Image (tube, rainbow, N blue to C red):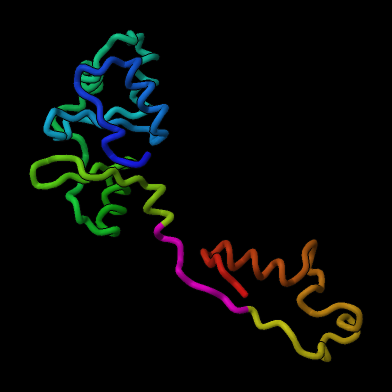
Amino acid sequence: MKHVSDLFISTSTKLRDVLVRSNETRRGIVLVVDEARRLLGVVTDGDIRRAFLAGTDLDTTADELLEAKGARPRPITAPVGASHEQLMALLQETGVSHVPLVNAEDQVEKLVCLEDLLQEDELALHAVVMAGGRGTRLHPLTEDMPKPMLPVGDRPLMERIIRQLSETGIRQSA
């Protein structure tokens, strides 16, 4: 998805076209907007599944879907310019995984996804692993193999160190 407008549908969009748009954009959500790009509601993949389970017809409009799910009067949004912390707090508080960002005219400018915010949270840290020396303290174990390559359990020590760094969010090590 290159532009948030790829997610826009109108109130008259039929469920079959909502499915196509949702599949094309692969975001799990489409945004119901009016002619001025003002947000009227959202339809998620979960909403579509629940509609099918309730026997909803493919010719049902997005407006009818919103009415059926009780999505009035207003979807959850955040203002353009909301901080990373504010957005994370809103997502945690509401339990949603997508938040449309709207401007002062209530027009959709961007869609923020939990997945995107979590990727931003990755640490911008690098690690340097100092491994070397003569190996005198662990002699005779280090006679034929350097200490970083000594097995600890089922893995070499260096592999364990690199995995632990990775698990804590450090992606670059030397």
Q: Position of residue 43 (x, y in %)?
A: 29, 27
Q: Position of residue 128 (x, y in %)?
A: 60, 79
- Quadrant housing the N terminus: top left
Residue furthest left in the image: 105
Image point (45%, 62%), residue name: 122
Q: What segment is highlighted magenta in the picture?
A: 120-128
Q: Nearer the viewer, residue 6 or 113?
A: 6
Image point (33%, 29%), residue name: 44
| Magenta-drawn stretch, dominant element (helix, strand or loop) | loop
Whether 125 is among the magenta residues is yes
Q: Position of residue 27 (x, y in %)?
A: 39, 36
- Quadrant housing the C terminus: bottom right
The image quarter containing residue 165 is bottom right
The image quarter containing residue 28 is top left
Image point (20%, 47%), residue name: 78
From the viewer's perspective, is 74 left or right of 2?
left
Whether 154 is among the magenta residues is no
